Amino acid sequence: MISYKMYTIRSIPGKGQGMFANKDIKAGSRILADELLLSIAESKIDEGIGERISVSLHGLPPEQQQQFETLHCPDHPTWTPAVSRFLANCFEVEAPGSGIFLKASRINNSCFPNAFFSWNQNLHRLTVHAMVDIPIGDEITVCYIFPFYSLQIRRDLFREHYVFECDCSACHVETGIGRRGEFRRRRMETLYTAIDKTNDGPSNNDQKELEMVLEFIRLAEDERLDGQFLSCIYSRAKKCYDDRGSEQLALEYAEMEVETNMRLLGDDHADTQESARDLDELKTRLAMVQQTEENGENLGAL
Ligand SMILES: C[S@@+](CC[C@H](N)C(=O)[O-])C[C@H]1O[C@@H](n2cnc3c(N)ncnc32)[C@H](O)[C@@H]1O
């Protein structure tokens, strides 16, 4: 067992090691900002991945190579141990790259996670933030993939990439919670793909895009799913409303985007800083519109 300020790493039956809160952790708190041990610039799983991992690993001092060897290594049917170990423990750094972080790699998966990981380019570290209040003693979990993927896709990715079967309540579709959740997640997956395909500029079908965005947000709230994907969707809602001249609604979604980014990424993340700048611009624009309207009213009253 290893204890740090906010968490302890210890074994759990059936899951290897895991990370546990050793104090009550408030939503938005930074649980860790982990240093990069090694990375590869291209994480696509092709025949060259073993070589890329090997080059990066052998560029490290022997002590750090040994630290990599201590990480969990699943028994994958086709990959070498180095590839299995890398893929089961890596996190995305600058896309399409992946990296290994010794502490974060002890965090297990849940499709109802209570924490969120993100590569922070400004800090050159991987951060993990509490998405919700985490009581002392609870396991700290992240979702390795988009949690709104349907059960079949989640199962396939967990088996293929990480070699485990997820046992969280979302993966038990025989229960009421699991079944209702699966229905919502399938719909969210469809909507996310469709929203992603719509153009960034003013589209021919703004109304349809806005309807999809609002439905996605409703489903995420019902399913209590959170993540940076949600702040991207808030950003789309902001843009849809702004494009149609509904600045007040655009402002509400801009505020939700900043709140989500602050909580999940922290104020030192480039995405948070960009969304905060956008919010300030929108507020300034809205204040100018209000001022112009007030001036017009005053002139009319003369
Ligand atoms: C990033 S590591 C997490 C820490 C790992 N348990 C350890 O012992 O170091 C990923 C591996 O943890 C295990 N794992 C993660 N989440 C799990 C879960 N919900 N149920 C069972 N095993 C899980 C799987 O073996 C997976 O390949």
Image (cartoon, rainbow, N blue to C red):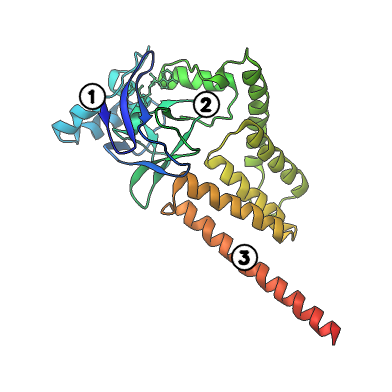
Question: For the residues marked 2 and 3, what is the alpha-carbon distance in whole angstroms?
Answer: 36 Å
Q: Which residue is mark 2?
A: 111
The residue that mark 3 highlights is 283
Residue 57, image quadrant: top left
Is there any visible trace of residue 201 in the rendered image?
no
Q: Is residue 93 left or right of residue 206?
A: left
Of mark 2 and mark 1, the one earlier in the sequence is 1
Q: Residue at x 53, y 62 (%)?
A: 277
Q: Percent x, y for residue 28? A: 46, 44
User: In terms of depth relative to the viewer, which is nearer, 207 or 7?
Assistant: 7
Residue located 61% across and 15% down the image: 173
All told, the count of numbered labels is 3
Q: How far across and down, in percent of the image, does residue 87 sit?
A: 37, 26
Q: Measure the alpha-carbon separation of dots 2 and 1.
A: 27 Å
Quadrant where the image shows the C terminus: bottom right
How many C-alpha atoms fall within 10 Å of the one at disc 3: few (<14), some, or many (≥20)?
A: some
Q: Nearer the viewer, residue 138 or 112?
A: 138
According to the image, label 1 marks what residue? Answer: 69
CB contact under 8 Å: marks 2 and 3: no
At mark 3, the secondary structure is helix
Residue type, numbered disc 2: Cys
- The reply to whether residue 98 is in sight is yes
Q: Quadrant of ligand 1?
A: top left
Q: Is mark 3 within 8 Å of ligand 1?
A: no
